[in-house]
Image (cartoon, rainbow, N blue to C red):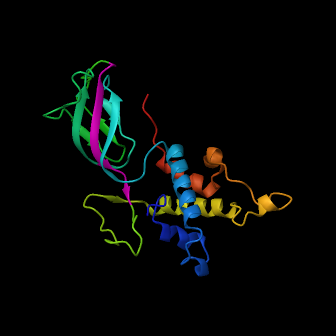
Amino acid sequence: MNAGLSNLATLKGYVLAAALRSATDYDAALAAIGLGVAGAFEKYCNRKFARVVGATEIFGADRCQFLISRLPVESVATMEVKQTEALGWVVQNPSPIVTLDSLAGIIYLPDRSDVGIYTTQVRFTFTGGYFWEQLEAGDGGYPTAQPNGATPIPPDLQFAWLMQCAEAWKKKDKLGQGITGGEEKTERINPANLQQKFLPEVESILAQYIRYSMT
C-alpha cells in the first residue's frame, strides 16, 4: 500500500524495531502518519509528488504559460478548452503547445497568444510525478517495474519523509498513557500545524523541492 512516499514495509522498517516489523498492530497508525507527513510535505512544497498517469489540471485561459503542480511532467496527452458550459471541453488538435519544461512543470504556448479570455478554461491531461514502490511483498506484481520515462523519487526526499515520520511516531501516545494517567506522557500530534514542526534537516531538504507559483 502507498504509505505516503513509499510502501508500508519501508516505513515500518525505518520506524519499528526489528521484532515488531512482522506484526500488524501498528499498521493503521503508521500508514496514517505516513500519509499525513506526505500531505504536509506537499502543502509546504506547493506541489504533488506521486506519479499519476492521466492526471488533469485546469487553469484560466488568459495566459500563455501554465504551471503544473505534479512534477516532473513526463508528457502531456491532451489540451482542451472550454469557452462555455454549453460547448463543454474541446480538444485542441493540433495542440498549440510549443515546449514543455518537464522539471519545472511549465507548459509554454506561443508568446502573446492567450487561449481565451479570463472566463475560458484550459484543461491539460498529463503524466507526471515521482515513481516509488507502493506494493507490499505479498502483493501480486511485486516488485513493480519502473515505467518507461518515469522518474524515481529522489533518495533525499524519501529519507526526509522517513525521518519526519519517525519523529511523529515518537510523539504518538501508543499505549494511551496520556489518557489513563494523570498527565500527558507524550506530545500530541496536530495535523494542522505538522508542517510548522519539521525537523531542521527535513526542512533543509524540502527547500530544494519547493514549487514557486508564477504571478
Q: Position of residue 76 (x, y in %)?
A: 24, 43
From which residue to which does the magenta span run? 118-131
Q: Position of residue 27 (x, y in %)?
A: 55, 67
In the orientation shown, which residue stands out farthest toward the bottom? 19
Instruction: Report if residue 100 lies within the magenta region.
Output: no
Q: Quarter-wise, where is residue 153 in the image?
A: bottom left
188 relative to 114 in the view: left or right: right
Relative to 87, is 71 above or below?
below
Q: Residue at x 44, y 35 (%)?
A: 213
Which quadrant is the C terminus positioned in? top left
Relative to 191, is 63 above or below?
above
Prevailing secondary structure class for the magenta stretch in the rendered image: strand
Which quadrant is the N terminus positioned in? bottom left
In the orientation shown, which residue stands out farthest toward the front? 180
Relative to 107, is 138 above or below?
below
Residue 125 versus residue 110: which sits nearer the camera? 125
Total marks shown come to: 0
27 relative to 167 in the view: left or right: left
Residue 190 versus residue 165: which sits nearer the camera? 190
Q: In this rendering, does residue 185 appear at all?
A: no
Q: Quarter-wise, where is residue 120 in the image?
A: top left
Residue 28 versus residue 74: which sits nearer the camera? 28
Q: Residue at x 62, y 77 (%)?
A: 17
Q: Position of residue 113 (x, y in %)?
A: 24, 23
In the orientation shown, which residue stands out farthest toward the left? 94
Relative to 86, is 77 above or below?
below
Q: In this rendering, does residue 105 appear at all?
A: yes
Q: Position of residue 154 (x, y in %)?
A: 43, 60
